[in-house]
Image (cartoon, grey):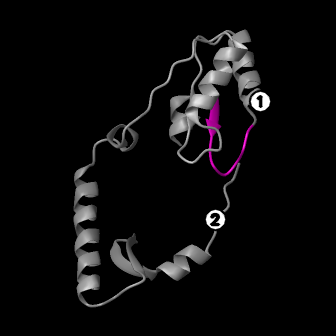
Amino acid sequence: MAAIAGGAEVVLIPEKEIALEEVAEILEQAYIKGKAHALVVIAEGAKCKTSEVVAYLQKEEIGFEVRTTILGHVQRGGSPSAFDRLLATRLGASAVQKLAKGVRGMMVGLIGNKIKTTSLEQVTERRKELDT
């Protein structure tokens, strides 16, 4: 979502590998079409490391100046709202209460408007495919 909102030309994610040649081609086409800048988003865990992408793009001279920005956690998530803070407090309190009662192998989360526990086994056996 952030990549779409930010107008990224290319997004590199762990779930889908993309060759550096393809990244360069996409950016080159954007430059040829007259774009003044292009944004490449590289997710944590992506197969290509930022340094590899930057080095390759500089070598290929695709037209754009290559610069990097590594966002911190606050920049990625934004400032927490009152709802975020209250939810974090409720989730944390619930998790501590469960631990105090000896409950293990569970996670707490918000389902509807209630704090519920779900077994880690149940969570890890479900695999949600990425729609690329």
Question: How far across and how far down the image is residue 10, in percent?
Answer: 65, 32
Question: How far across and how far down the image is residue 79, in percent?
Answer: 28, 43
Answer left or right for 40 relative to 75: right
Measured Cα–Cα span from mark 1 to mark 2: 26 Å
Mark identifier at residue 42: none
Please say whether residue 44 is visible from this viewpoint: yes
Q: Main secondary structure of the magenta part?
A: loop
Give the residue type that dot 1 points to.
Glu
Rendered view: 102 above or below 125: below
Q: Residues within 10 Å of mark 2 (few under 14, many from 20)?
A: few
Please say whether residue 8 is visible from this viewpoint: no
Mark identifier at residue 22: 1
Secondary structure beneath label 1: helix
- Residue 92 in the magenta stretch? The answer is no
Q: Earlier in the sequence, mark 1 or mark 2?
A: 1
Answer left or right for 127 relative to 95: right
**Quadrant in which residue 99 is drawn:** bottom left
Q: Closer to the camera, 6 or 123?
A: 123
Secondary structure beneath label 2: loop
Q: Residue at x 63, y 39 (%)?
A: 12
**Quadrant in which residue 66 is drawn:** top right
Q: Closer to the camera, 91 or 113?
A: 91
The part of the chain drawn in magenta is 8-18
Q: Closer to the camera, 6 or 66?
A: 66
Residue position for label 2 = 128
Q: Residue at x 51, y 19 (%)?
A: 67
Q: Closer to the camera, 5 or 43?
A: 43
Question: How far across and how far down the image is residue 39, in percent?
Answer: 57, 25
Indicate which label's residue lies in the foreground, 1 or 2: 1
Give the residue type that dot 2 points to.
Lys
